[in-house]
Image (spheres, grey):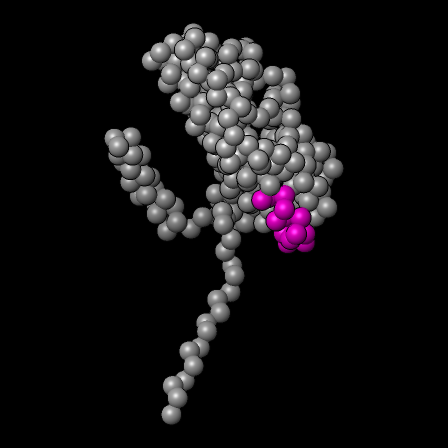
Amino acid sequence: MSPNPPVEIVYPMTYTFPGRGLGAVALILGPVLLLAGTLLRLPYHYFFPQQLIAVAEQPARMAAAHTLVIAGTVLLAPAVLSLAHRIGQTRPALATWGAALVLVGLFERTFHAGIDQAAHGLVRREGATFATDLVSQSYQDLHLFSYVSFTILLGWPVLAFAAYRSRVLGPFRATALALTCLLPLGVLKGTEITSVIAVAALCAAFLPTGLRQAFDGPRPTRKSVLLTLTTLPTLTALAYVSTLG
């Protein structure tokens, strides 16, 4: 007698990443941190020679700006996923394309930030002149992300169109989200007026959604609050250990 075939258990799909809480935090903090870092480096010309000189002259300020920008950029990933989940309820294809394009663009910005960090280290150790010469020699080198730079520009308008078509965002906030494509792209890019416009527009698009998401729905349970509070010291310790290797 043949054995009975295994029974497939189908679980209801009640959870999607990043969830309401993390999604709300990302929608709020991501644009705010990005705006703070963008404004910190406002006094300096946005192209890389002036950015490297600024690192030599104002190391603490530029380090803070760089840290805030990359932290905001990373937080935009779960923010975009959270928005895409809302869009996908009625416009799944547009949600997929918009989120995918924006996420690839965010990955590219993170890649650029790693190069920025290495260049900042060169300034501290070898001086701005040496770092500028080295960066200028390799600035046009090809790499994987050279071929997908268009996603940084195209992703935000597509996501904005998707948000508008799904009625997740109204016309004003959808237009503001599309304006995020004005943020300059590339290695060691600083702040210009279009940078401020782009990030301020992103704040206008994301913050109301994040605040609404944070206060809508049930409050966190006592168990989840206690779990979060007990996890934070562990994460802090792991963060410190991570710096040792």
How many marks are shown on the rendered structure?
0
Q: Can the viewer see residue 57?
A: yes
Going 55% across and 40% down the picture, which residue do you hit? 103
Magenta region's main secondary structure?
Answer: helix
**Residue 91 sits inside the magenta stretch:** yes
Going 25% across and 30% down the picture, which residue do you hit? 244
**Residue 197 sits inside the magenta stretch:** no
Q: Please, which residue is most extreme toward the bottom here? A: 1
Q: Position of residue 43 (x, y in %)?
A: 54, 10
In front here: 203 or 77? 77
Going 58% across and 33% down the picture, which residue do you hit? 149
- Which range is magenta? 87-100
Is 96 situated above or below 5?
A: above
State the image quarter where residue 55 is shown: top left
Quadrant holding the C terminus: top left
Q: Position of residue 3 (x, y in %)?
A: 38, 86
Going 57% across and 35% down the picture, which residue do you hit? 147
Q: Position of residue 165 (x, y in %)?
A: 73, 46
In front here: 148 or 4? 148
In front here: 48 or 135? 135
Q: Can the viewer see residue 208?
A: no
Q: Position of residue 56 (x, y in %)?
A: 41, 9
Quadrant holding the N terminus: bottom left
Residue 163 as seen in the image, left or right of residue 19: right
Is 62 situated above or below 25?
A: above
